[in-house]
Amino acid sequence: NRIPHWFTEAAAVWGEGGPRPAGWWVLLTKAYTNDSLFDMDTISLRFVRPRTPTDRTQAYAQGHWMYAFLVERFGVRAPLEMMDLYAQGRSEREAMTEVLGITPEAFFADFKAWAHGELIEAGMLPGEEEPALSALLPTENAITREKVDAILEEHPGHAELLQLAVQLVLRENDSEPTAGMAGLLERYARARPVDPLPHRMLAKLSLAGEMEDAPERAIEHLEFLDAREMRSPAYALALAERYAEMGRLEEAWAKVTRATMIAPFDAATREQAARVALLRGDLEAAEKQLEALAKIEPNRELHRRRLEALRRKMKDKG
């Protein structure tokens, strides 16, 4: 099996289809600016022989990034054609030369040039004509909100400045967002579209009813957060509740179903899923959720009574 390790892992992550995690963006930006991206001879090795605590994570993140470059530059068929050659026992050098028309070294050089543009577009690096934050604020002493606001007048879309401004305002408010900073948070979200922080803050404000069109505004930010959340059902459940309140029951069901996949043994999640199923009039789906609830909490008599009542209703309806 000659398939490079990085390629195998990158293809698997690519197949999941989710957006790149915010932590990966931070790690990749640091690796790029420090000139510590793994070259083609090193990246596969760092999966199995990491030298630092972040090497393995960087290998996953960089491999996925390189795969994205491969697809964008050479088309969706290119990695599949390379896999066919790997299956024949061909080396990475042979596969790249035949399918891409370039050597691994040239591929890596082109990738780094493309990656620079990606980091600018993501707001992780300043644009070509934007000064670095260190040039705008040469010392960290006496950095005040007033000083940052004044510099933002000249550089209104500077992502690092906007991030600093957000941090300063949050520090003044015990890390809690206020309605007055909504505009600043929205500017930062536009300048650095990969950072979940402004979306968390804006979702919190919307859910608290402190912004106009609160339900719709909350959905926009909750969707951003849910797309990047793999461990907690919180955002999916919040979306399910919002969609149900708005009568968008199919979307509510899709979100609550996702929540049960993330946390299949959480009773509250199953209960909300049963509730949405009943709102949709899907008694069979509600029955499955109540059955799961009865298994998760077998000592709760309420679940058994609800299940029996639902089955009587299904029998009468049938």
Image: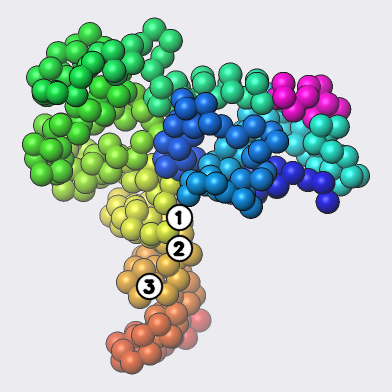
Closer to us: 312 or 124: 124
Tag 3: amino acid: Asp
Main secondary-structure element of the magenta-colored stretch: helix
Occupied quadrant, residue 193: top left
Q: CA distance from mark 1 to mark 2?
A: 7 Å
Secondary element type, mark 3: loop
Start-end of magenta stretch: 96-107
Which residue matches tag 1? 230
Residue 216 appears in view: no
Residue 63's spot in the image, x, y percent? 61, 39
Query: In the rendered image of this protein, does residue 179 appear above or below residue 316?
Result: above
- Seen at 62% across and 50% down, the residue is 49
Residue 132's spot in the image, x, y percent? 33, 16
Sequence-first tag of 1 and 2 = 1
Which residue matches tag 3? 266
As drawn, the residue found furthest toward the front would be 51
- Seen at 13% across and 32% down, the residue is 169
Q: CA distance from mark 3 to mark 2?
A: 9 Å
Query: In the rendered image of this protein, does residue 253 appear above or below residue 191?
Result: below
Residue 192's spot in the image, x, y percent? 36, 28
Tag 1: amino acid: Met
Residue 169 appears in view: yes
As drawn, the residue found furthest toward the right would be 88
